Image (cartoon, grey):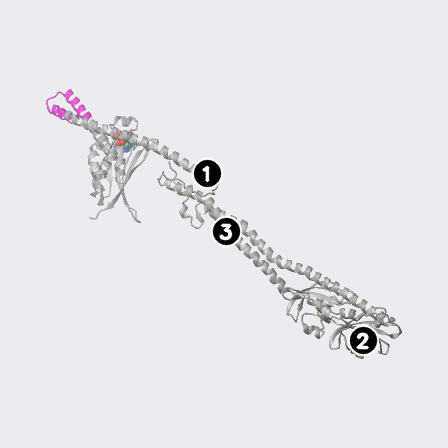
Amino acid sequence: MLVHVKDIQPADVKIGLRQTRLGFQIRIRWIVFASLILASVMPLIGLYKWMEVSALQKEIAYADENHLTIAKNLSATMDRYANDVASIFELSIRSLEGSYGLELREALDSFDLSFVTVMDENDYVLNEVRATSTTTSPRPPPELMAGLRSQAAADPDKTIFSGILQFDGAPHVFLVRNLSDGKLAFAALKLQYLIALQNTIKFGELGHAMIVDQNGIVIAHPNPEWQATSKDASKLSVVQQMMAGETGVATFYSPPMQADMISGFTFVARTGWGVMVPQPMRELIARAKESEHIAAIIVIVEIAFIILMSWWLANLIATPIMNVAKTAKEVSAGNLDARVAMGSASIKIYEADLLGQNFNWVLSDLQSEQNRLNVALNAAHEGERVKSQFLSVMSHEIRTPMHGLMGILELVENGTLEDGQRNLITIGQKAANNMVCLLDNVLQFVRLEFNAQSGKVSKFKPSELAQGAVDLFQPLAMQKGLSLTTSVSDQLLLGDPQIISQILLNLVGNAVKFTEEGQVHIASELRDGSNGKENRLVLSVTDSGIGIDKDLQPKIFDEFIQVDSELSRTNEGTGLGLAISSRLAQLMKGEITLTSEPYKGSCFQLNIPVTVAEV
Ligand code: ADP
């Protein structure tokens, strides 16, 4: 038997998920696809989120290291420069004091020193050496001199670097040193080298360096105005940290740049100057964003690739399974020639491919088995046909001489006979009648088997058909002392009264035959076929007879079946009546059903479709 593949209809599961009696059905294509996407896209998105956060952190860490290194390098260079300048200054003093006559003018030039002067305690110039580029040397005003003297007095045996001082129309740093006898040596240092040094530091868009003196006054800065006017930057927290001799990295808000800045900072050991290397934070953020964008593009491309791969893989797995399901459906619909399409793709799933192949082999086996069965079935049908033809011919051939025999018996009966002879003739007539009856039944059964045709439809009243049966069987019923009653509708219906009548006669005949006491009742029910259903007539014949054993009930409608009981043995019959009746009912698209209990009685119900006739 072929299994009907009705539970899983591929075409029904359109969106991948549908509810059935047993729960949810999900397409394998979607399961594989969703699992692959979840397994690969989720970590990618997580990775991207991590990169998003860490990109800025990395930029900041890099800036921390980088900016501080630049500041430290710058500070080391300036320290060496300050020491060199101090050495030249001290050498110049020794030359002036000891009249060594060293030619230091060019050396002063190369270290940006304008002049070196030695004054007595009354600010009277005792000695002086000028750089080659210095033609005139304006005298520092008295208040500047006073300031220098007080700075020199603070540490008498050391060359002191002053803070930034405006002199001769430009900012200068002065080197001062106390000499013996109240003398004071001082030199004016121009800031070109420091400015040039600061100028070399440029990175990013606005990354730069700033040099301040020990009081937080700008020595060198990209803004020329700040340099020229000796801008006071001591209010900046980071400048204060440098003035306190600290080294590190700080973030702060810069009002002139209107930006949050990050800066490495340190100080120059020899002079106490501060060196800082700031850069706007937004540049770091922009660079981090750039990395993020690149990461986002990579992630998007990768996700697209994963989606395509997942869909391809999901189809690779699902398609062969669907092909098997489709083929199973076709086979279930009766097409045994259907085969699973194996496809010609170069990459296939081994197991799915094997499933399709094996399914096709099973189908091939099934088809050859089916062919063998068809041959056997045809042979059986042919045998059946030959048997029926033989029965039909034989019945017909026997019927003709039987009628002759019956005519002769009738002629003999009409003559003068002795009582014993008449009895024998009557028995003979009865036997001949039964024989003709049997032959008629066999003939009708054979005809029904092979030339099944529905009878003609005409108007009838069920009550009239029931009355016909009563009229026929009343004498026998009375003879057995049975009551034969009807309660049948006299509604005018459309159907095949001839066939219905034949079935009814058979059922009532059996009921009377197999009932020894009690009653036989014929009833009807007309079931309304509202809601698009057809009307049905149910005719039931109920008796209080011997009943039929439960085991035999299913077989009772098979041909030549007779219940082997004492009563049935005493009754004549062919075992064809119910088989014929049942086939006649099927011809009318109806059926006969039986409920029976041994020794209590039976109820046969004929249930057929009818139409209510218009009067
Ligand atoms: P038959 O010509 O022998 O009556 P049927 O096909 O009409 O053939 O009935 C088959 C058998 O079913 C009968 O021989 C009898 O044993 C059983 N049968 C039929 N109708 C009844 C009934 N109303 N009560 C008891 N047994 C019945």
Q: Secondary structure at mark 2?
A: helix
Give the residue drawn at x 46%, y 43%.
Answer: 346
Q: Position of residue 305 (x, y in %)?
A: 51, 51
Q: Amino acid at mark 1?
A: Leu
**Left or right, 536 with reference to 67:** left
Image quadrant in which you'd find residue 410: top left
On residue 354, which mark appears? 1
Image quadrant in which you'd find residue 84: bottom right
Quarter occupied by the N terminus:
top left
Queried whether the magenta region covers residue 147, the answer comes back as: no
366 or 423: nearer the eye? 366
Circle 3 crowding by C-alpha within 10 Å: few under 14, some 14–19, many from 20: some
Residue marked by disc 2: 147
Q: Amino acid at mark 2?
A: Gly
From the image, state whether disc 3 or disc 2 is nearer to you: 2
CA–CA distance in space, label 3 to label 2: 78 Å
Ligand 1 has an atom within 8 Å of the beta carbon of the residue at disc 2? no
Q: Classify 209 as above or below 50.
A: below
577 or 443: nearer the eye? 443
Residue marked by disc 3: 307
Q: Give the magenta part as a residue range.
A: 406-433
**Left or right, 394 with reference to 335:** left
Q: Position of residue 336 (x, y in %)?
A: 36, 38
